[in-house]
């Protein structure tokens, strides 16, 4: 179970590292949904750290909590892909273009965001030639981690079950 916990820490940190790398190295500007998609991976890394330091039964509970966190990550990725494809509008107001109403030029400049906003329907592609946006890859990544967590929990449960049989038998 500790190896699964360590894997969740590394998986959460890897997802965040890719996001930050694409932002600060490649110059991709994240949209509001992109920023929301990072939160489950922060929580995932935190739960993994908790599972590393807690006693076995509490660690097992922390790893079980990784499952809904990964489902939220997959949901946010799917939501973002739907916005990118134009299937539905973004639920976040910051994903819309800013509108400026009246006032002087100085007032308009003062009301502009400090950082250029990127609309949520503009997909960011990390790998040239691969038609998967970063949002789609994030959702797939989260879904791929769910069986890893389940297997880590099941392996430990089988091991613990065998130990009981040998003690009782």
Image: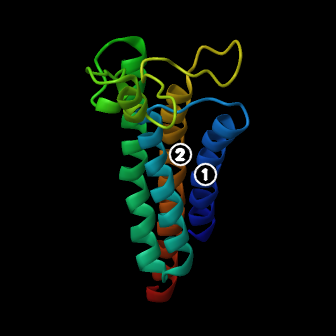
Tell me where residue 61 sits by quadrant: bottom left
Residue displayed at 63% across by 65% down: 3
Callout in the foreground (1, 2): 1
Tell me which residue sits at (50%, 56%) in the image: 42
Q: Provide residue 66's location: percent of width, then percent of height.
A: 43, 57
Marks 1 and 2 in Cβ contact (< 8 Å):
yes
Please state the horizontal and vertical placement of residue 112, each as a whole percent of the image. Answer: 41, 31
21 with respect to 131 (left or right):
right
> Label 2: how many residues lie within 10 Å, few (<14), some (14-19) or many (20+)?
some
Label 2 sits on residue: 145
Hey, which quadrant is residue 25 in on the image?
top right
Is residue 72 rendered to the left or right of residue 156?
Answer: left
Mark 1 or 2 closer to N-term? 1
Image quadrant for the N terminus? bottom right
| Above or below: residue 166 compared with residue 158 | below
The residue pinned by badge 1 equals 11
Residue 37: which disc?
none
As measured in the structure, the alpha-carbon distance from the residue carrying label 1 to the one carrying label 2 is 8 Å
Q: Residue 167: horizontal and vertical position, in percent?
A: 49, 88
Residue at 65% across, 47% down: 17
Q: Nearer the viewer, residue 46 or 142?
A: 46
């Amino acid at each position: 179970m500790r190896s699964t916990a360590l894997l969740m820490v590394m998986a959460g940190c890897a997802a965040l590292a890719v996001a930050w790398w694409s932002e600060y190295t490649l110059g991709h500007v994240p949209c509001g949904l992109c920023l929301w998609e990072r939160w489950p991976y922060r929580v995932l890394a935190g739960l993994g750290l908790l599972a590393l330091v807690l006693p076995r039964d509490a660690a097992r509970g922390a790893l079980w909590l990784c499952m809904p966190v990964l489902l939220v990550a997959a949901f946010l990725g799917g939501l973002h892909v739907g916005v990118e494809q134009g299937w539905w509008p973004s639920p976040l107001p910051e994903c819309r273009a800013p509108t400026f109403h009246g006032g002087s030029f100085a007032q308009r400049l003062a009301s502009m965001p400090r950082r250029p906003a990127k609309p949520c329907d503009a997909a960011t592609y990390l790998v040239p030639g691969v038609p998967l946006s970063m949002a789609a890859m994030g959702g797939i990544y989260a879904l791929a981690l769910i069986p890893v967590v389940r297997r880590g929990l099941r392996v430990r449960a089988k091991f613990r079950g065998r130990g009981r049989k040998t003690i009782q038998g």
